[in-house]
Amino acid sequence: MKRVLAIAFVLALLPCLAFPQVMPGPYMQISGVVVTSRGVPIPGCLVRLQNPDVGLSYPVSTGPAGDYYFPEVPTQVRTLYVIQVFWNGSIIYNGIVYQPGLQPPITIPVP
């Protein structure tokens, strides 16, 4: 009986060996670019990534090409992150980050 259970256990694990699961690390990276509606980069914006549920907040400034980068964002947080863009102290964009990595461009309408 023990032998049958052992064989059944090994057979049950075979699919796991064929398709290994990739576990995320403790941190993820989030990056992107802030541009005008004409595609011109906007340097010097404050970009804030935050998780209001747990009180995490990460501010960075956009570079000369309008780019921003958050290198170590905890993955243990199970709720979505909010991303906000500020210009001269005023919020000009408010959105949600759905997945790690490179984000779609944040387009700011310019009159």
Image (tube, grey):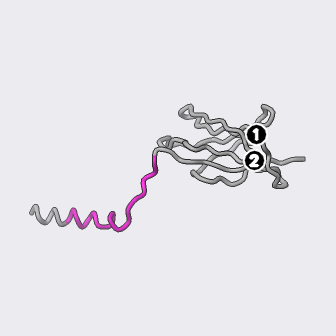
Query: Please, what secondary structure does the residue beneath circle 2 have?
Result: loop
- Assess whether mark 2 and mark 1 are in contact (beta carbons under 8 angstroms): yes
**Residue ID for mark 2:** 66
Specify the quadrant of the image occupied by residue 51.
top right
- Overall secondary structure of the magenta section: helix
> What is the tally of numbered marks visible in this picture?
2
Disc 1 residue crowd, few under 14, some 14–19, many 20+, Cα 10 Å: many
Question: Which part of the image, by quadrant, shows the N terminus?
Answer: bottom left
Disc 2 residue crowd, few under 14, some 14–19, many 20+, Cα 10 Å: many
**Residue ID for mark 1:** 45
Is 16 situated left or right of 83 in this image? left
Query: Please, what secondary structure does the residue beneath circle 1 have?
Result: loop
Q: Position of residue 62 (x, y in %)?
A: 73, 43
Mark drawn on residue 104: none
Image point 75% across, 37% down: which residue?
86
Tell me the amino acid under the disc marked 1: Cys
Image point 63% across, 41% down: which residue?
82
Specify the quadrant of the image occupied by residue 60.
top right
